[in-house]
Amino acid sequence: MDTLTWIVVTALAGGALSVLAAAAVALSARSTWVPGLISYAIGALLGAAFLEVLPEAITASGDARFTTAVVLAGILAFFVLEKLVLWRHCHVETCEAHELAAVSNDHGRSGLMILIGDTFHNFVDGILIAAAFMEDTRLGIVTALAIVAHEIPQEVGDFVILLHSGYGRTKALNYNLLASLATLIGGLVAYFALGTAQTAVPIVLATAAASMIYVAIADLIPGLHKRTELAATLQQVVLIALGVGSIALTHYFLEG
């Protein structure tokens, strides 16, 4: 397949897969699955950032110092954006937004905010996927897998909010699937925009690495510290390692 086809297929399949998987988990009421998914997602994000995306960004730019400076700036930028509530999404059911939505039906207001934020987030994911594929097909596949791994636990939380906000199951599923189309739109916009500005690809890749690192470290890992018992800690470590390992194995099989 050519680069554009890879972007379209992975954007559509990845978005639909994460939403459907999240819906299956949320509707089956297996909330105990969510911490495990989050631990795995942390490993997948960190593995993709440090083993794939960041090395490719450095290679593409030819300047390690500049690339790592972009990563640092990206992490700081995501912190500011999150503080301004422009890119805030919850990953576990115990966060403030979920607690608020669970208290009472707010006639869809919380659900609407979640859908708007999720649509923007998916659009950015599409840009990152496109930039990765434009650099290397293998890198694109690994990046898409890492994004899907991260999206599933996030989508579980979003789905729960929509249900508590008064949306029916079918409507919540349909709206989430519609929001996932923003991934395709972001991918197409990035493909045609970056196609005429190849020098921007390393910067986008470095920003993608910053995004993965920030989400894993700032948004996901703090939630794991709420469970301090030894068994839970060992489970988290194993699942994080499994996430990293899945990225390493994907790299191995694609290279082979």
Image: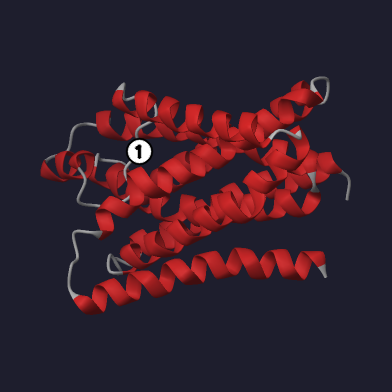
- Residue 124: % across, % down: 56, 32
Task: Decide if residue 167 is on the left or right side of residue 5.
Answer: left
**Nearest the camera: 105 or 81?**
81
The residue sitting at 37% across, 71% down in the picture is 237
Instruction: Count up the numbered dots.
Output: 1
The residue sitting at 57% across, 54% down in the picture is 146
The quadrant in which residue 87 appears is top left
| Mark 1 Cα shell of 10 Å, populated few (<14), some (14-19), many (≥20) | many
Task: Decide if residue 19 is on the left or right side of residue 30.
Answer: right
- Residue 166: % across, % down: 25, 40
Can you identify the residue that label 1 sits on?
89
Looking at the rendered structure, the kind of residue marked 1 is His
Evaluate whether residue 183 shows in this view: no
Task: Decide if residue 60 is on the left or right side of residue 241.
Answer: right
The residue sitting at 17% across, 73% down in the picture is 229
Residue extending furthest left? 103
Secondary element under disc 1, as helix, strand or loop, is: loop
**Nearest the camera: 19 or 90?**
90
Q: In this view, does 49 lie above or below 111?
A: below
**Nearest the camera: 86 or 93?**
86
- Residue 31: % across, % down: 28, 65
The residue sitting at 35% across, 38% down in the picture is 89
- Residue 77: % across, % down: 44, 25
